[in-house]
Structures are given as C-alpha cells and as structure tokens.
Image (cartoon, rainbow, N blue to C red):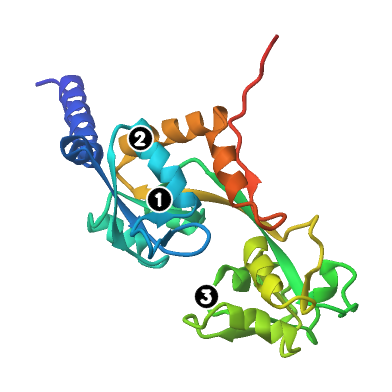
Amino acid sequence: MNKLLSLTLCLTLSFFSGQAKAESGISRIIETNTLRCGYVEYRPALEKDMATGGWIGFNADVMKVVADRLELTLDFTVPTGWATVVADLKAKKFDMLCSGFWVHPNVGKFALFSRPIMFQPVFVVVKEGDDRFKTQSALNDPSIKMVALDGDNPVNIAKVDFPQAQIMALPNMTDFSQVLVNVATGKADFTIVDAYTFGAYNKSNPGKLKVLDASHPVRIYPVSYVFGAEDVVFRDAVNAALDEMILDGTMNRIFDKYEEYPHAYYRAVVPYQNPY
C-alpha cells in the first residue's frame, strides 16, 4: 500500500470513528425518544411545583418547547451542581444540563455550550445611603471590603476590576442572602450580584441596598445549556430549536413572564440583515 493511500485510509477511518463517537449521544436520544435533563433548581429558572409535581420556571418553559420541536419526551432526570456538571455529563447521567449556565472558558475546555438563551448582567451593590462611591473605580481601594461566596464568580471579578479591595469570602455553602446582609449591615462595603437576586432581596428588605450604576453592569454573562464534549450533533439540533424560538418570538414571550425586576435579563437575538 502506497503512503498516500495509507494516509487516506487512516484519515477516513479516523473520521468515521470520530463521527460514530460524536453521534453516540444523539443515537441514544433518537432510540429512546427521550431527552434526559440534568438540572439545578433555583428561582425563577427552575423549581418543582409542590402542588402539581410539575416543573416551572423559564428553563422549564424553554426546554418544554425545545423537546416539543425536536419531537422528544422531556424528563428532568438527575439533579446536579454547578461544580459537577461536566463530570456528570461525562458519566452519561443525563443528556444535557437543562439549567442555564454562565458560559465560562474553563468549562469550555471539557464541554459544549448551546447558543445563549439570554444574557445576564451583574452589578455592584452597596448600602443605601452610602455616598462614598460615585463611580465603580472608587471601589478599588485597600480600605474597601467586598463580600462574596468563596469561589463564586464575583470573587474573580473583584480580583480583576478591584484588585486593591479586600475580599471577605463566606463559606461556599452559605445562603446567598447572607452576602447581601453583610453589605446591608455595614460588615462589607459592596458585593456583585445579578438584578433578580438584588430585586428579590430588595422587595423583602426595602431601603437597605442599592445598585451603584444600573446602566453599567460589571459583567454580562451569556447563559447557555451544557452538553458533553462529544455531543456536537445533539447540541446543534438544540441550537436549531433555540434559534427558531428566538426568531418566532417564543423566547421573548417566555422571558416576558419572568421580567419581575428591571435589568434582570438581556434578550438574545439571531443576527440577520434584510436587504429589502
């Protein structure tokens, strides 16, 4: 066998071997006609309705439509955690994470992301009446203390944007409301949080906290679903459904239901140009 033919055969076998491996997830889904969801419960994205036993929240609404358009039965199968999603996908405990996940480059080394279903801004929150901070740059000072859960994204944001500020890290399993309580009671000067979490706290505790500058979020995170590293075909099928939902207005109608607080969700779009 000449070298060229040998190389061609090796490449061909490698291609089909890789293709079969990549399609293993979609093959199981087609065979069973069932989409097994891994999930993380958090309001208002996804939670069990104790009265009906069904699932409610914007992730539930989005995934019900996705499953319907792919002609699949939807099954919220296995609870998981943000830190264990990749390992659970690799272990084939479920077909995809059906809870919206902030896209992170490090996770992208080991898993696939869907196209964003929306974008979520996060903001600096300080104590109401604290007028020391006219701009976010004033937070970058050794005398200023920021509070967050240990290992959570706000810690990384503070290290980049406010490297001189002190960081008060609470144990990771602490209820997140305690982060906001620490700012409200003056134990810390600021934290970084999404608008829904701030809005829910502010509704129960009016006049305690304020967003420093709602027109300038410190970060905007794409929110996507997560797939195993080999499930390219299935990821693209879900993407096709999500694109269709954005273009026909379904996605906007879903998020309109959950727009309880301002600046909570920035809407995703599918870019195109109408030449006429």
Position of 74 relative to 262 (above/below): above
The percent coordinates of residue 10 (x first, y second) are 17, 30
Q: Residue at x 62, y 67 (%)?
A: 197
SS at circle 3: loop
Q: Say what amino acid the circle numbered 2 marks.
A: Asp
Q: Residue at x 61, y 74 (%)?
A: 155
Residue type (three-letter) at the residue carrying disc 3 = Gly
Q: Which mark is residue 226?
A: 1
Q: Which type of secondary structure does the marked residue at label 1 adopt?
A: strand
The residue at 37%/59% (across/down) is 39
Q: Which residue is mark 2?
A: 68
Residue 97: horizontal and vertical position, in percent?
37, 53
Labels 2, 3: front one: 2
Q: Which residue is mark 3?
A: 151
Q: What distance separates the C-alpha of mark 3 from that of mark 1?
A: 20 Å
The answer for how far apart the CA atoms under marks 2 and 3 are is: 37 Å
